[in-house]
Image (cartoon, rainbow, N blue to C red):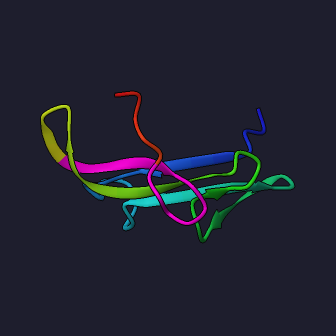
Amino acid sequence: MRVPYYVIFDPQHLILPDVLTVYRLDGLRYQVQEKAWFPELNLGLILWEGEYEGRKDLWLRWSNESGTLIPTGK
């Protein structure tokens, strides 16, 4: 399918040692990407610890290039 990115969010470290891992398609192979930044979307992903919908946890959130959180629909 040649999906341009794969993102693995693994807060319990069940799959990988890092909580967040991003792979980018490079030719026919996927390479680990240092930053969770997607220039085509002008968006990034960051880890955010806080409360959302009454649950305190570690969340994966969209951000702008400077790391500012993009508000949720609420």
The residue most toward the top is 74
As drawn, is 36 to the left or to the right of 25? Answer: left
- Res 64 quadrant in image: bottom right
Whether 56 is drawn above or below 24: the answer is above
Residue 36 placed where, x, y %? 57, 60
Residue 58 placed where, x, y %? 25, 52
As drawn, is 72 to the left or to the right of 12? Answer: right
- Res 54 quadrant in image: top left
Question: Is 41 in front, or is 1?
Answer: 41
Q: Does residue 67 show up magenta in the picture?
A: yes
Identified at 39% across, 66% down, the residue is 18
Q: Start and end of the magenta stretch?
A: 57-69
The residue most toward the right is 27
As drawn, is 59 to the left or to the right of 36? Answer: left
Whether 31 is drawn above or below 9: the answer is below
Residue 32 placed where, x, y %? 63, 65
Question: Is 7 in front, or is 63?
Answer: 63
Identified at 77% across, 48% down, the residue is 40
Question: Tag count in the figure?
Answer: 0
- Res 49 quadrant in image: bottom left
Identified at 44% across, 58% down, the residue is 46
